[in-house]
Amino acid sequence: MTIPTDYAEDMQALLGADYPAFAEALLTQPPLRGLRVNTRKLSAEAFAAVSPWPLSPSALCRDAFIADTEDRVGLHPYHHAGLFYMQEPSASAVIEALDPQPGWTVLDLCAAPGGKSTHLAARLGDEGILVSNECVASRVKPLCSNLERIGAKNAVITSAMPDQLADAWGACFDAVVVDAPCSGEGMFRRDEVAVREWSREHVLGCAERQLLILEDAARMVAGGGILLYSTCTMNIHENEEVLDRFLSAHPEFTMEPITAVSLPRAFSTEIGLREEIALAGRLMPHVIPGEGHFIARLRKSGDEREALPFSMGKAPGKAEQKILQDFIEETFTSILWTEPTLRGDAVWLSPGDLPYAVRSGVCLGHFVRGRFEPDHSLFLAENADFFQRTVILSPDDPRMAAYLRGEQISADCGKGWCAVCVEAGGQAYPLGMGKASNGAVKNHYPKGLRNFK
């Protein structure tokens, strides 16, 4: 890559004597591959013990590693089972800095493709509510897919502009995460398009948009709650200066230190801004093992709180309830974690609907011509013990590769719907479903997720 001339001048002025080390890192050091374990399903230690690739712990997130591999990791059965998410190391520090607690209600305002949302879902577990919003319609599908793959149960996915959400919901979140659209300087080592599209005008335009997003985000933070602001860029205009301008307009917010992870401090008085901005974290590739990033944690005063305006779908009718109950008794070993609701022909296990929601919770399945067919997402949301019939395969079993290609496989597990699982460290993790009969399993792995190689 070639560093844009204007960008080099700006960073030289900002970094001074540190600029040569920064430029060398940008030009000569390859980007690192980050892997974050989905702790909804297993611990970081358990994954490290079975990892197909050499791993070294990340200094930026307790559940993350640096993966030493050039493999297409998305083809591995562990990825299909949602055991991990590939996430750039610096990006994994964002939710680490938030340190969300089970039971919180959290909004990820700019969520696609889902790195921060999947991290939030893992930290919240089955307690609390995660609302993941993406205003660009074309980016909603990958967001849904990633949250489905990691088994999020209490996630509501919405698609609306921030001001629409703020008008509809009010101050109802324990935390709002704004991973803001930015000029993407932190992507320079990974994406030549980010280099080509960079300009000073683009940077200043992004800063204005970020400030508008923060204005709406602030309206949705409950009193005593946290507003977490992050970007994957390195200039001061989109980072420190945006914060300074926001704090000037919002005395109800104050900066607070990031304690869950140790981060290099941001600039403040040395560039003419308020001292407290130094509490933010500024991640740069010559200082930390990752790309450029900026993270700030702000606390809102007061105790104002509104309730999320949830509405529930209707309950299945008597005939549908009988079909559904028969399916549950034939397929599961325990009761469902919440009451099912009906939307069209689909049955959902949902925390409730919200304005602008496109998906809420886990789809249990669909009524099809008088019978019930389960949905793929159900098999990723529960562990293997939840299902009466399981097919457990090692990652290198030829039947595993065949299943992920969409082929029928041989297995003797009785008759009916079964969970196809991958074995890891003596545990079984579902990655899809099939229908078993006469020693064979008919493949029901979604076509769009299959491996073709």
Image: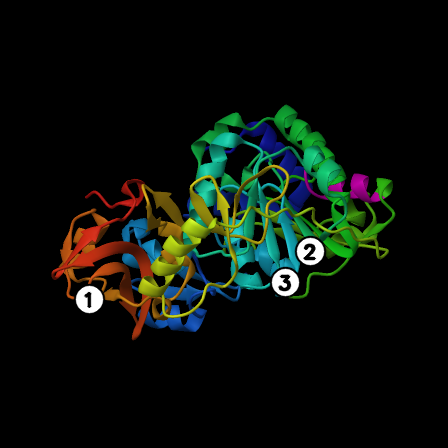
Residue 217 appears in which quarter of the rendering? top right
Kindly identify the amino acid type of the residue bearing the numbered disc 2: Arg
Name which residue lies at 16% across and 48% down.
407
Q: Residue furthest bottom?
A: 426
Classify 382 as above or below 449. Answer: below
| In front: label 2 or label 3 | 3
State the predominant SS element of the stretch in magenta: helix
Q: Which mark sits nearer the N-terminus, 2 or 3?
A: 3
Residue 265, which numbered label? Answer: 2
Nearer to me, 302 or 22: 302
Tag 3's secondary structure? Answer: loop
Percent across and percent down for residue 193 are: 46, 30
Colour mapping used in the image? rainbow
Percent across and percent down for residue 144 are: 46, 44
Identify the residue under disc 1.
413
Tag 1's secondary structure? Answer: loop
Q: Which residues are magenta?
A: 237-247
| In front: label 3 or label 1 | 1
Name which residue lies at 40% across and 55% down.
322
The quarter of the picture where the C terminus appears is top left
Nearer to me, 396 or 442: 442
Kindly identify the amino acid type of the residue bearing the numbered disc 1: Cys
Identify the residue under disc 3.
99
The verdict on residue 246 being magenta is yes
| In front: label 2 or label 1 | 1
